[in-house]
Amino acid sequence: MKKAVNLTVNGEQHTDEVEPRLLLVHYLRDVLSLTGTHVGCETSLCGACTVILNGQAVKSCTVLAVQADGGEVLTVEGLEKDGKLHPLQEGFWEEHGLQCGYCTPGMIMASYQLLQRNPNPTDEQIRHGLEGNLCRCTGYQHIVKAVQYAAEKMKSYE
Amino acid sequence: MPITPKMVGARIKRREDPRLITGQATYTDDLQLPGMLYMSVLRSIYAHAKVNGVEVSKARELPGVVAVLTAADLAGQTGPVPCVAEAPGMKLPHHPLLAEGKVRYVGEPVAVVVATSRYVARDALDLIEVDYDPLDAVVDPEKAAEAGSTLLYDEFGDNIAFRTEVPNPAVAQALKEADAVVKLRIVQQRLIPMAMEPRATVAQWDRGMKQLTVWSATQIPHLLRTQIAEALRVPENHIRVIAPEVGGGFGAKLNVYREELLVPYLAMKLGKPIKWTQARREDFAATIHGRGQIQYIEAAAKKDGTVTAIKAKFFLDLGAYFQLFTPMIPSFTGMLMHGCYKVPAIAFEQIAVFTNKMATDAYRGAGRPEAAFIAERVIDAVAAELKLDPAEVRRKNFIAKEAFPYPTPAGLVYDSGDYHAALDKALQIVDYAALRKEQEELRKQGRYLGIGLSSYVEICGMAPSTFLPPKLKAGGWESCTVRVDPSGKVTVLTGISPHGQGQETSFAQMVADELGVNIDDAMVVHGDTAVVQYGIGTFGSRGMALGGTALKMSLEKIKAKARTIASHLMEAPPENLDFGEGKVFLKSDPSKFILFQQVVEAAYGFKAGVPNIEPGLEATSFYEPSNCLFPFGTHVAAVEVDAETGEVKFRRYVAVDDCGNIINPMLVEGQVHGGIAQGVAQALYEEVVYDENGQLLTGSLMDYAVPKAAMMPFMELDNTVTPTPVNPLGVKGVGEAGTIGSTPAVVNAVLDALAPLGVKHIDMPLRPEKIWRAIQDAKGGQG
């Protein structure tokens, strides 16, 4: 009793037959082989699986693929444009905003939404904006700087 | 990128990052192999129970299930989970891959399922019926040691895994003669390492080649290979272990777990590639925990604050089974509990017990945070008792910088240090005098500002090899091959196994400087036993000090050979040759040079007739250090405690760390930041809680408070630089320093804030509720 889902992921159209219980994150990882989105806790607490679904950051470990049917998904793999890094990717690189890299895709996608909602966040607003995303390596300080870097850069970014 | 004259010491952006920020990195769970099957693990729901039987027939019938195994199916097929560490008189429990007759902790593997999808593998677990006879659980480590306690192992007669004592009669004498004696009972609560990437293992058996390939989220691919060979009785040269991208370890992946043996075993048995990925709940219950000590401390001091002796009794909560290094980790605590102070007499006793919990083992700092905490609490308690300034008491007791190399009472030799310099710098940055003044002002207003100091020293590198247990089939050394290809590109094969530390960058910096090549022409390869010579791995803050020195040795060999070749080609004495800008040039006249590429071509083309050399340009080195390394520093935390709510707010956090010479300051900052986060977490937030039945109450991220961004202070970092004489790079290590230095700074700050209220002690983590209670209790005491 598989069900058809139609999804646009990073601008590409996909149609697949999936089990109704298949999680969006497993659809992305196992069906589409987009393994940039990670699973950290399966309980929407760590944020490693954060993707943008229809313009909103969601924890893809607690969304069913069928719930996302007809939707548009943006993952970390879809951020580069014409071979150029997104300012957030650049910011994380420039400011040493990552170490093991496991939380990074989710952290970047959560920051993506944060900057959409608030293009000029303060240090405190960034810290609160990322409270759904855990990092065990960096102590967050360089992540805050990475988001600030991106905010600055995005003022001149199309 | 143009060649920078000096890469070492510069903030070079990480070469690891492009793949990580674009989602192109491959972690273990990202692997997809044709015909892959999935393993799931049925885990005990009881902390302690007899297992009368495991009924698996329904699970076996579920469509998609390929195999279901229990201990009975494994009998005689595999060796146990290895523990290489030993303690005198230690009882070593048998550590089977699946529970045999009894379960001893919540989360202990009882059965495994292999199925065609991860979902079916998970479904099948619900169809397995286990007939348990629950037994009383042993949870409290002090009670575990008592006669008459329920036994984890009937055959041992008690729950005491080992008992060791390092006595010193001078301690009793010093306590007798002391002007002040401070007594502390410190609970080093258990912590969960919580690498963001849960453990995962994939294995594939090539029947034709008799080749077993294991991908595992590990910090020690070579050691894991050796242990798999032994447990599964496969010749080691038929096993390839790959640590692909590894999402953090913090010591938790410095181990060999049941699943890391089960997955390859099943891959061989079933002839199919198998993947297993741990769920977070499993990670909390069945990946090693850190810390887990109850410490009884007595310290003697003279009126002027001089500490004359420290005596300790440790109850070590080791858990139900031993993992790779379980019995060894706490041994660092007693050894280092006097910290950076010249305490003439120390004595300690360890009572290590079995409890119905997951094993403890190395977690960031591994035995040293527990030691630094003792030293730093003792100093503050002495200062409070004698009404002295804690900074002054530290100065009074510091080992002087002229005293290095300093032989410690526990038989270590501290390599180098300047403890005054780090303290002075930290106090200057934080403006200690002004803070103390402000504290006084605020107290008058009924506000509680606290200033906490921590001057730590730690031990890292964990070598020479005699420092590691005899049963470990490798030493504390490290290896490195440098291979220059005919095209002039440089490959570094390192035996360390970085998983976030950034040596793909820092090692490339070293190559660029030493050989004078472009950093983009250097590639650092690690974590694949088929490609890299035997190496030890990444743990104990050893990457740069050991792996970097092995690299340096190989680079020197490459340069010596390149000099011989260039000397022949240029008709110049080799000692007059140097490397830079892609050239080998005359030191006396840099305008006279040949290209490094010409040297490489001469080495591989081998037509230039250079006498007495072999073809090729490659060198391998194995570096065995003469001593461990002892990084140090001072952390200062300034916090304000809300006496109404018990909330702790950071005002300042200053860390001055000394890890010797620095290769890449950006990476050092990152290590210190992350280290502080985990140390602050122990002080304020994190705690593993098992209830009286041995149920893990903190079994998810909902219940276990890993710090979020808003829970961390802004960290102001600086360094002093005291190179070590132990290695030619003069580097120590920085991976654990932040964790070791920060916990006592934060606890001392909170207790300093609460001093006027009469609060002298609160067990970690200092959560608002506990602080509030301590304030109420102190008030009650006064009233």
Image: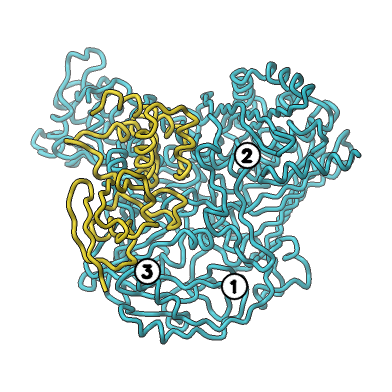
Chain colours: A yellow, B cyan
Mark 3, Cα crowd under 10 Å, few <14 / some 14-19 / many 20+, is many
Q: Are marks 1 and 3 on the same chain?
A: yes
Question: Which residue matches tag 1?
Answer: B46
Q: Residue B220 appears at what percent x and percent y?
A: 41, 53
**Nearer the camera: disc 2 or disc 3:** 2
- Work out whether residue B358 or residue B155 is closer to the camera in this orientation and state it: B358
In the rendering, which numbered label is found on residue B743?
2
Mark 2 and mark 1: Cα distance apart in space: 33 Å
Residue B628 seen by the camera: no
* SS label for mark 2: helix
Q: Residue furthest front?
A: A70
Q: CA distance from mark 2 to mark 3?
A: 38 Å
* Residue for badge 3: B263
Q: Is residue B698 left or right of residue A118?
A: right
Image location of residue B355, percent across then percent down: 65, 65
Report whether mark 2 lies on the same chain as mark 3. yes
Q: What residue is at 53 percent from the left and 68 percent from the top?
A: B107
Mark nearest the camera among 2 and 1 is: 1
Residue B14, located in which quarter of the rendered image? top left
Location of the N terminus of chain B by quadrant is top left
Crowding at dot 1, Cα within 10 Å, few <14 / some 14-19 / many 20+, comes out as: many
Q: How many marks?
A: 3
Mark 1 and mark 2 in contact (Cβ < 8 Å)? no
In the image as oriented, which residue stretches furthest toward the right?
B783
- Quarter of the image where the C terminus of chain B is located: top right
Of badges 1 and 3, nearer the viewer stands: 1
Residue A55: % across, % down: 31, 43
Residue density around tag 2, few if under 14, some if 14–19, many if 20 or more, within 10 Å: many
Could you give the CA–CA distance between mark 1 and mark 3, rounded to whole angstroms? 24 Å
